[in-house]
Image: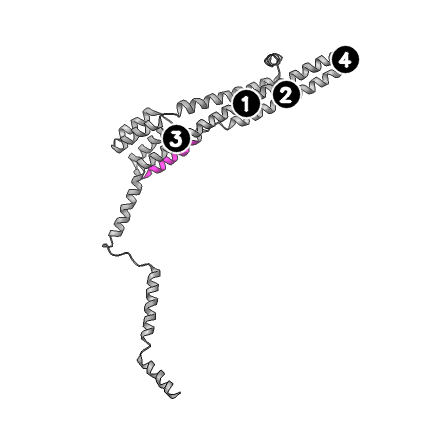
Amino acid sequence: MWSQLAISLQSGNTYLYLILFLGFIGTVIIFERLIMLQVVYSLDFKKFLNNLRRSVQAEDIERAVSICKNASYTSLPAISLKALEAKERDPASVRGAIEEESIDFLPKIEARIGILPALSTLILLIGILGTIDGLWAAFDSIEILDTAEKQVRLSNGIANSLNPTTMGLLMSMIFLTGHQLLRGLALRLTERVHYGVSVLMNLLAPAEMSGFMPAMAMSGSSHGGSAPSVAPEARRESSADNKIEVEDDSFDDSSVEDIKDEEEII
C-alpha cells in the first residue's frame, strides 16, 4: 500500500496532492490548538486561586495584580486582572468586567476545533472522487488495447485508483482522533475557567449585595422602628368588617319593638 502511494505521488496524482495540502492545514490546526490548550491557556488553577484569595482577603491588591501578571496574560489570570482593575476604579463594575472578559475568552478555547470534522469529511470525499476518476480512466483505456494488455492495464488502473481513497481514509482517521482529543481538553479547560470565574465572583463581587442589604435595613429603620404597614387588601377587609358592624348596630331596639307590635296585631 505504501509503495503504491509513493508511486502515485511520483506520478503526480492531483487528488493525492490536494489531500496532502488539506492534511497539512489540519495538522497545523491540531498542533496549534494543542499548544494553546496545554501551554498558553493551561496553568495550576488551584494554586493560582489560593494565592489570589489570600491577597484579596488581606486587601493587598498590588500583590494580587502581580500574581495575575506573573501567571499568564490570557485565560483566568487575564480575567482576574480586569476584575481587580475594575475593583480599584468602581467596585460596582466588578461583576460586569468579569462577565465581559469571560464572554470574550471562552470562545477562544474551542476556536478552529470545529473545522477538523468538516476537513476530515472533505478529504474523504476528495479521495472517493479520485478513486472514481481513476476507475473511469482505467476502463476507458482498455477499449483501445489488445486482449493481452487489457488485464495488466486494468489491474494497474484499479490499484492506482484506490490510492486517493486510502490516503483520504488515513487523514480522516487522524483528524477525527485529533478532534476528539482537542474537544476533551477544551471541555476540561472550560470547566476550570467557569470554576475560577465563580471564585472571582465570590471574592470581588459580594460588596454589591452587602451594600444592598444595609440600604434595606436603613429604609426600615427610618420609620422609627414602627410595625410593618398593613397591606391595602387587609385595610379594605377591616373597613368592610367595620361597615358590617355599623350596619348591625343600626338595627336598634326600636325596630325590635315594632316587629313585636306587628306580631301581636297578627
Q: Which one is closest to the eye, mark 2 or mark 1?
A: 1
Going from N to C along the chain, the mark reached first, 3 or 2, is: 2
Q: Residue under circle 2?
A: 130
Viewer-closest of 155 and 233: 155
Residue 163 % position (x, y): 62, 17
Q: Residue under circle 1?
A: 173
Q: Secondary structure at mark 2?
A: helix
Q: Residue under circle 4?
A: 147
Q: Secondary structure at mark 4?
A: helix
* Farthest-out residue, bottom: 265
The kind of residue on which mark 1 rests is Met
Quadrant of the rendered image containing residue 62? top left
The correct choice, above or below, for 242 with respect to 149 in the image is below
Say few, some or many: other residues with alpha carbon within 10 Å of mark 4 (under 14 / 14 to 19 / 20 or more).
few
Q: Residue under circle 3?
A: 192
Residue 112 % position (x, y): 48, 27
Q: CA distance from mark 3 to mark 2?
A: 45 Å
Quarter of the image where the C terminus is located: bottom left
Q: Which one is closest to the eye, mark 4 or mark 2?
A: 4
Magenta residues span 92-106
The kind of residue on which mark 3 rests is Arg
The correct choice, above or below, for 195 with respect to 18 in the image is below
The kind of residue on which mark 4 rests is Thr
Q: Secondary structure at mark 1?
A: helix
Contact, CB < 8 Å: mark 3 with mark 2? no
In the image, residue 95 lies in the stretch drawn in magenta: yes
Going from N to C along the chain, the mark reached first, 4 or 1, is: 4
Say few, some or many: other residues with alpha carbon within 10 Å of mark 1 (under 14 / 14 to 19 / 20 or more).
some
In the image, residue 97 lies in the stretch drawn in magenta: yes
The reply to whether residue 146 is in sight is no
Which of the numbered marks, if any, corresponds to residue 84? none
